Image (cartoon, rainbow, N blue to C red):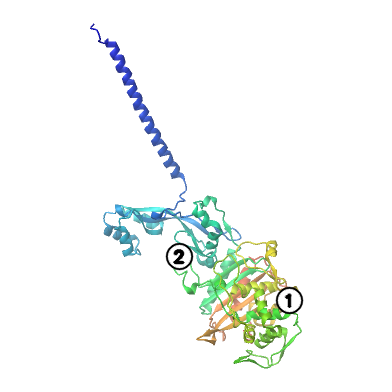
Amino acid sequence: MESGTAPAFELDAKRKKSGNRARNRVVMAIACFMGIYGVIAGRLVYYGMQEDTSGYNGPTGAVLASRPDILDRNGEVLATDIKTASLYAEPRKIIDPDEAFELLSTVLPDLNFEQTYSRLKSNAGFAWLKRGLTPQQKSQIMALGIPGIGFRTEKSRFYPGGPTASHILGLVNIDNQGIAGMEKYIDEQGLSDLRDVGLADSRSLEPVRLSIDLRVQHVVRDVVVNAMQRYRAIAAGAVVLNVNTGEVLAMASAPDFDPNNPYNALDKDHLNRMSAGLFEMGSTIKSFTTAMALDSGKATLNSTFDASHPITIGRQTIHDFHGKGRVLTLPEVFVFSSNIGSAREADMVGIENHREFLHRLGLLDRMQTELPEVARPFEPKVWKKVHSITISFGHGMATTPLQTAVGAAALMNGGKLIEPTFLPRTVEEASKVAKQVVNEKTSDDMRYLYKLNGETGSGRNAAVKGYRVGGKTGTANKVVNGRYADNVRFNAFVASFPIEKPEYVVLTIIDEPKPAEGQSSGIAAYNAAPMVAEIIRRSASFLGVKPDFGQEVAPLQVSYDGDE
């Protein structure tokens, strides 16, 4: 063997050692790659199992948050989230924008050509084409096989009752954000903040329970819509209010809208007239004028007022419709709905005290409640005697029907003003926020007067067998071209039952009604009062009021010769 030459067995050993190291490196590399891909696969599986709460909203990456369910007082679902598909495009992957639009329009014929086409031919990475598709539309578009077209699962709001409680619930925008009604209120109570930090997902949101009773709400809306048609009115509305808690059990205003398809929700004719509409409430305001006179201590049920002649103030002369032409007792002023008698009641109390009383009853201040759509009442900037006189019978000031119902509840419940709420509230909770606005004796007297008017006056058409209903009608002539028109009216009826110990106030309105078939007049006694009767007849059992047939009153159909 030559010097410096390694034996053959040594060379074989070196080669084996080098091969082992190579194999080890390959195995380690394979293990590393398998580990990396295993982690990636695990994360993909993890994300695939998670609920889609991102609601990706296009290039901005905004979060489309979940919303809590809205329930009625008995747990019935009024609003909930559902998953819907939304159509998007990746324009950079669109091969032929013209062909893509033609194919899409076969399924979505309402697509705007200019807007959609400009998005399809743009150089953007993402563009929404249509939000909120139906499952059928999604299936048909998928079958077209258009490159660069895709779908995202989003949250959409669904209202099982459609328009039943639309003005209470409100609605959301395309991004599931509340923009009206209780939906907006919920956002303002912290949901929008949760959305901003990405914490608004369905697993962490408790349902929101309202004071509304869906059964009563169905009745009220049905009565309102039917009355609007029967009396050929431009609008109608009603509210049912618990006099001891301030809870709104039902409220409807027609025309309304379907929050599932709110194309006409912003039309001015679809305003929520009960809380956002301002009206001269006519003779329903005489409830407060009479209560004011009684509460002042200057009048009693035995007081008398001279209504034998009209009252002239400046250029205005105050008349009574079907006046008696004699001195009237205070109950007669109320039952005969005497404008002259009401004017004398206001004059007895004085201008400043009159204004203060209406503010005390909440009729001239913006109402505080959860519903965002609340109008600010109108009153003269400076009250003069003529203003006090006309306001005494419901002209010259404008307030909302809901505020009128709230004020009437204070006259029925012992004199406590309780701001209305659309959330559940107990009697104990209500007592903490209640304000004593008239004394209990005044409330007792007003219950007597409501009962008297329900039995012998304009409220007789609101009578319901087994339920003692009392109340006050209001027939207000509307202003047309700067003057009060004789045949254009806004009618209302505010009622309470059972009148001996009231539990609820029901107020109805009907705007510009025409006489129904077989009727000669369109005054409140013939339309607004029967609306109250139907609401009570159909909903009293839902409200937990038991009938008492031991104290029957006047028959349902009567002919009233008063002014309302």
Q: Is 532 or 23 nearer to us in this picture? A: 23
Q: Is 271 or 225 nearer to us in this picture? A: 271
Q: Is 413 or 528 nearer to us in this picture? A: 413
The correct choice, above or below, for 114 with respect to 306 in the image is: above
- Which label belongs to residue 442? 1
- Which label belongs to residue 509? none
Q: Position of residue 172 (x, y in %)?
A: 48, 62
Dot 2 crowding, Cα within 10 Å, few <14, some 14–19, many 20+: few
Q: Please tell me whether mark 2 sits on a helix, a strand or a loop.
A: loop
The count of marks equals 2
- Which label belongs to residue 261? 2
Q: Residue at x 40, y 56 (%)?
A: 86
Q: Position of residue 235 (x, y in %)?
A: 52, 76
Q: Please tell me whether mark 1 sits on a helix, a strand or a loop.
A: helix
Q: Residue furthest left?
A: 2
Quarter of the image for residue 554 reads bottom right
Which image quadrant: the N terminus?
Answer: top left
Q: Position of residue 333 (x, y in %)?
A: 69, 85
Dot 1 crowding, Cα within 10 Å, few <14, some 14–19, many 20+: many
Quarter of the image for residue 384 reads bottom right
Q: Is residue 24 left or right of residue 400?
A: left
> Distance between the Cα atoms at labels 1 and 2?
48 Å
Quarter of the image for residue 539 reads bottom right
